[in-house]
Image: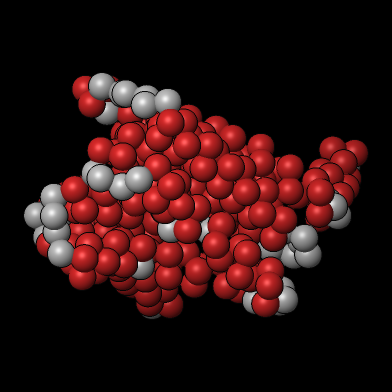
C-alpha cells in the first residue's frame, strides 16, 4: 500500500513539473543524441566549403534550413552542377517528413499561441521530435510539456550551428572510412526500439525498413516518404485487422 501510494504521488508530482524543469529535461534527453550530431555538423561544414559555398552561405544554411540530411544533399547536388530547380525539389521532398512530425505533435501543441507554434516548428527536427514526442505521450496532460521540445530543440540548434562553424573555419577533416554519419541512425534505433510494444509497431517498422532498403534507387530520395507512408499504412492496417478479429 505504501509503495503504491508513493508511486501515485511521484506520478502526480511529475505532472506538476515547472516550465524550467521541463526545459532542462528536454536538454538532458537530447544530450545523448549529440554523439551523432557533432560529427554530422563537422562534416557538413567541410562539405559546404568543398561544394563551392562561401563560409557565410554554409553557416546561414545551417541556421535557416536547419536540416542535416537536406543540407548535405543540397551541398552534394550543388557541387555536381545540378540545376537549381532540381536541387530545390530534392531538398523539399526530403524535408516533407517534417509534415509527419507536425501532424504527430499537433494535438499536443494546438492550444499554444501562434508565436510559440512558430518557434517550436522551427526547432522540430528529427532528433528533437524523437525525444519530445516520447515525453508528450508519457505526460499528455502536462500543461508545460512544450518546454521539453524547446529545450531539446534549442540544444540541438546550438550544437548544429557550433559544429558547422568549426567545420567551416577549422577545416576539420574526417576520414570517410569512419562512416561517422552512421551514428545518427544508430541513435534513432536506440530511441525507437523501446517504444515498439505491439504487432502494429512491429509491422510498421518492418514495412518501412523493407521499402527504405529496396527503394534506394528511386529518384529524388522518394524512398523516404514512401517508407514513412508505407509504415503508417501497415501499422494502421494491422490495428484495423486486430480490432476486427477481436470483435469476432
Instruction: Answer left or right for 5 relative to 162.
Output: right
Instruction: Answer left or right for 64 relative to 123.
Output: left
Residue at 84 percent across and 38 percent down: it is 3
Near-viewer residue (187 or 91): 91
Near-viewer residue (92 or 142): 92
Tally the numbered discs.
0
Residue at 47 percent across and 37 percent down: it is 165
> Can the viewer see residue 210?
no
Quarter of the picture containing the C terminus is bottom left
> Can the viewer see residue 98?
yes
Residue at 64 percent across and 58 percent down: it is 136
Near-viewer residue (51 or 193): 51
Instruction: Answer left or right for 158 relative to 248.
Output: right
Near-viewer residue (110 or 53): 53
Task: Determine whether 234 is above or below 35 in the image.
Answer: below
The quarter holding residue 90 reads: bottom left
Residue at 80 percent across and 46 percent down: it is 21
Residue 232 location (% of width, % of height):
35, 67
Instruction: Answer left or right for 223 relative to 91.
Output: left
Task: Determine whether 105 is above or below 163 in the image.
Answer: below
Residue 226 location (% of width, % of height):
24, 65
Quarter of the picture containing the N terminus is top right
Residue 198 location (% of width, % of height):
43, 54
Residue extending farthest left: 217
Task: Determine whether 60 is above or below 142 in the image.
Answer: above
Residue 139 location (% of width, % of height):
70, 57
Amino acid at each position: 500500500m505504501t509503495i503504491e501510494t508513493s508511486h501515485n504521488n511521484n506520478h502526480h508530482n511529475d505532472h506538476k513539473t515547472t516550465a524550467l524543469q521541463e526545459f532542462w529535461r528536454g536538454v538532458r534527453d537530447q544530450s545523448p543524441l549529440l554523439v551523432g550530431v557533432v560529427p554530422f555538423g563537422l562534416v557538413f561544414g567541410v562539405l559546404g566549403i568543398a561544394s563551392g559555398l562561401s563560409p557565410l552561405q554554409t553557416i546561414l544554411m545551417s541556421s535557416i534550413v536547419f536540416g542535416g540530411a537536406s543540407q548535405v544533399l543540397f551541398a552534394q547536388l550543388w557541387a555536381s552542377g545540378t540545376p537549381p530547380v532540381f536541387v530545390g525539389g530534392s531538398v523539399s521532398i526530403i524535408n516533407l517528413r517534417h509534415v509527419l512530425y507536425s501532424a504527430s505533435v499537433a494535438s499536443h501543441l494546438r492550444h499554444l499561441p501562434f508565436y510559440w507554434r512558430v518557434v517550436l516548428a522551427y526547432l522540430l527536427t528529427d532528433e528533437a521530435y524523437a525525444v519530445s514526442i516520447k515525453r508528450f505521450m508519457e505526460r499528455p496532460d502536462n500543461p508545460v510539456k512544450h518546454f521539453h521540445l524547446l529545450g531539446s530543440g534549442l540544444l540541438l540548434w546550438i550544437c548544429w550551428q557550433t559544429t558547422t562553424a568549426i567545420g567551416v573555419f577549422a577545416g576539420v577533416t574526417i576520414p570517410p572510412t569512419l562512416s561517422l554519419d552512421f551514428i545518427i541512425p544508430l541513435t534513432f534505433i536506440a530511441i525507437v526500439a523501446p517504444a515498439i510494444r505491439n504487432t502494429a509497431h512491429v509491422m510498421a517498422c518492418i514495412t518501412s525498413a523493407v521499402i527504405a532498403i529496396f527503394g534506394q534507387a528511386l529518384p529524388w530520395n522518394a524512398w523516404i516518404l514512401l517508407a514513412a507512408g508505407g509504415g503508417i499504412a501497415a501499422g494502421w492496417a494491422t490495428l484495423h485487422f486486430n480490432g476486427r478479429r477481436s470483435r469476432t
